[in-house]
């Protein structure tokens, strides 16, 4: 019976790698029961305190960062209403992920969307033209997720919050994203060194840019330093006034600006744990995680960081909140560490001005000597914190070593492959021959 059950599950998910992996995972490692010692209130208090502690260090910061910029000749003053066909495509193209806040399953909504299309069209277009997001679309249900299976499940510090949003709210966001995705590239307003949230870009393009820059420098007998910046709860501490000012500088005004302001403000969330749900808590900072627009808004919020980095002669590449700095220099340059330290000091100031927390304790430094150049340690000091170079560092899931041989990463991947093959052997008795 068990083999038949899993055979049917594998057949149902054969064309969906995500579901197939989840089925294998449930068979190999059934999720443990959530500890009864924790409650929804424990989690909501922990998540809120973590953000409040970070925000408290910005208490004296202004809500406007940097000088005002010259107004752009381009402008996006409103979001255009969509046709019923465009609304239909948005609804049916979305992944049918159902949230407890959805009145009906999203898959059912997609099935009957043709009958509801006039009402959906009116709802979405009314929001776009009025520059207003209904309050029911600004609620989130947060599920605590254990960061690693090996961590203690009874410690709230070992969990990260995962926000679940209603299907219709994300459909409305996609209507706005489509228009922002036209306006921003057409007017060259996106950071060319940001690989996140761009068509045709991914973590692979970010890694390719970084490794190619390091390889080229090495071939030219230049030494390089790769600095991987780490931010604490970056998406949760975004200041709304600074973000809205940034959007104004990018030419977004009128009803379009009002819609984004409405989208950001008046949001709330509840934490669900076991059978309990916490009381709603207000969200006064941050961009909604798990949302459609949140990641794009964050990339616009941090766009001006690039000019700070470039002013020190360093190059950079980003993927979401992962920022990678590259500085290549002749081996005889004994001021390299000082220049990197000066750059990081200015980055730290920029972060504080923008209410972001640079975590120097988790920031990594990788020193790569040039071709035929001896290896030596490189250390930098920022805000009285010492960042020392290491032999290897994980960057966007790939382990880079200081020789660019990828030998460490290859060992880790092959070890993981062997482990997965062993796991398949373990579950073989639970499968039919067809599976």
Image: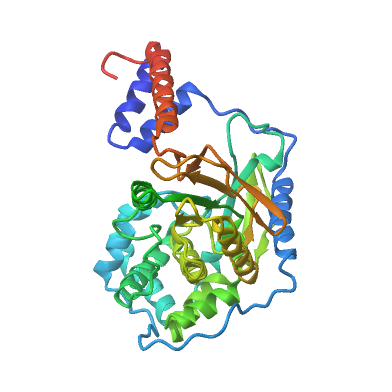
- Left or right, 167 with reference to 36: left
**Residue 152: image location, x then y, percent:** 68, 31
Q: Percent position (x, y) of residue 71?
A: 44, 88
- Left or right, 285 with respect to 180, comes to right
Q: Residue at x 48, y 82 (%)?
A: 248
Q: Position of residue 42 (x, y in %)?
A: 74, 46
The residue positioned farthest toward the front in the image shown:
332
Residue at 67% over, 50% down: 386
Q: Is residue 113 above or below residue 305?
A: above
Name the quadrant of the N terminus: top left
- 49 sits left or right of 259 in the view: right
Task: Look at the picture and state if 379 lies above or below 67.
Answer: above
Residue 1 visible (yes or no): no
Front position in the image: 241 or 310: 310
Is residue 122 something one can see in this rendering?
yes
Q: Quadrant of the C terminus?
A: top left
Tell me: 257 left or right of 116. right
């Amino acid at each position: 019976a068990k083999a038949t059950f899993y055979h049917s599950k594998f057949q149902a998910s054969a064309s969906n790698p995500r579901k197939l992996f989840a089925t294998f995972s449930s068979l190999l490692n059934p999720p443990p029961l959530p500890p009864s010692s924790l409650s929804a209130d424990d989690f909501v208090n922990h998540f809120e305190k973590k953000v409040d502690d970070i925000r408290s260090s910005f208490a004296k910061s202004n809500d406007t960062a940097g000088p005002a910029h010259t107004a752009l000749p381009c402008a996006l003053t409103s979001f255009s209403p969509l046709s019923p066909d465009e609304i239909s495509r948005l609804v049916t193209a979305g992944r049918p992920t159902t949230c407890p806040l959805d009145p009906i399953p999203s898959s059912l909504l997609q099935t009957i969307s043709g009958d509801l299309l006039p009402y959906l069209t009116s709802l979405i277009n009314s929001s776009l033209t009025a520059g207003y997001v209904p309050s029911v679309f600004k609620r989130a249900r947060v599920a605590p997720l254990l960061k690693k299976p090996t961590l203690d499940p009874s410690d709230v510090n070992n969990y990260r919050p995962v926000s679940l949003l209603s299907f219709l709210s994300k459909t409305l966001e996609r209507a706005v994203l489509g228009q922002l995705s036209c306006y921003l590239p057409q007017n060259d307003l996106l950071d060319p060194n940001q690989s996140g949230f761009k068509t045709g870009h991914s973590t692979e393009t970010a890694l390719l840019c970084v490794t190619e820059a390091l390889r080229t420098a090495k071939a030219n007998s230049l030494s390089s330093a790769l600095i991987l910046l780490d931010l604490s709860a970056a998406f949760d501490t975004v200041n709304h006034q600074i973000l809205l000012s940034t959007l104004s500088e990018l030419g977004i005004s009128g009803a379009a600006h009002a819609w984004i302001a409405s989208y950001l403000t008046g949001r709330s969330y509840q934490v669900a744990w076991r059978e309990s749900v916490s009381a709603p808590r207000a969200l006064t900072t941050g961009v909604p995680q798990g949302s459609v627009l949140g990641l794009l808004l964050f990339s616009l919020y941090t766009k001006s960081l690039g000019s700070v980095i470039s002013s020190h002669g360093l190059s950079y590449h980003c993927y979401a909140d992962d920022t990678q700095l590259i500085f290549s220099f002749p081996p005889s340059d004994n001021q390299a560490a000082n220049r990197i330290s000066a750059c990081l000091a200015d980055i730290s100031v920029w972060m504080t001005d923008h209410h972001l927390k640079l975590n120097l304790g988790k920031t990594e430094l990788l020193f790569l000597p040039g071709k035929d150049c001896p290896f030596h340690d490189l250390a930098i000091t920022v805000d009285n914190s010492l960042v020392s170079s290491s032999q290897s560092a994980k960057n966007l899931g790939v382990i880079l070593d200081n020789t660019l041989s990828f030998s460490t990463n290859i060992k880790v991947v092959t070890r993981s492959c062997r482990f997965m093959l062993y796991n398949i052997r373990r579950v073989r008795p639970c499968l039919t021959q067809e599976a």
